[in-house]
Image (cartoon, rainbow, N blue to C red):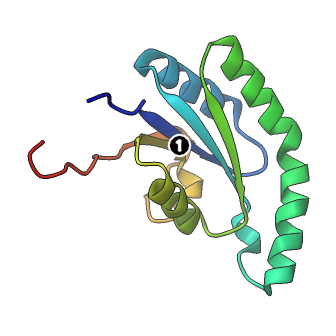
Amino acid sequence: MQLEQAKIIVVTGSNMDQSLAQYALKVAQRLDLEVFVLFVDHGNSCGTDGQRKKAAILFEAEVKEEAARFTSLARDMDILVEIIVDVDSVESAIAAVLAQEKGIRFLICTRDLLPKTAKLKQQYPELTVIQPELSAGE
C-alpha cells in the first residue's frame, strides 16, 4: 500500500511574512512535504453570496503576486505547492482544506491568524502537528 505524500498548510493573510515563508519552505524541504498555501481574507466572511464572491475575486487579485513569489521559491527548492484563496474565517477555511486533503500533517501560521492561541509580543511562526486518523487494523 502506497502512502499519500504528507502535506503542510501555510496560513497567511494577503502579505506573507518572509520569516513564515522561509520557515515553511525549510520544514517542507526537510520533511519532504507538499505545501498548501492558504491565503485567507477573514475580514470579508459576511455578506451575501454575491458580495463574498466579489470579495474573493478582489482578494485573489491582491494575493496573486505574493502567491507567485512563494511558488517560485518553492519550485527553486523542488517543493510542490498549491495556492488556495479563501474569504471565510480562518477556522472554516482550514477545516475545508483538511476535509479535502487527507494527507495534511502540519499547519504553519503566525499566532495572529489563530485567534484561539495566546498572543506573544513577537510573532513567530507556529507549527501545529495534525494527527492522521487511522483506519481499523492500521
Residue occupying the point 51% across, 17% down: 29
Q: Position of residue 40 (x, y in %)?
A: 69, 57
Task: Name the secondary structure under disc 1.
Answer: strand
Residue occupying the point 45% across, 20% down: 32
Is 21 placed above or below 61 here?
above
Closer to the camera, 99 or 137? 137
Q: Position of residue 18 (x, y in %)?
A: 70, 30
Where is mark 1, residue-wise? 9
Mark yes or no: residue 122 visible: yes
Q: Quadrant of the C terminus?
A: top left
Residue occupying the point 80% across, 28% down: 69
Position of 24 compared to 64: left or right?
left
Amino acid type assigned to the residue bearing label 1 in the image: Ile
Position of 67 compared to 78: left or right?
right
Is 68 placed above or below 62 here?
above
Which residue is at the far front? 1
Residue occupying the point 55% across, 29% down: 24
Q: Position of residue 4 (x, y in %)?
A: 39, 33
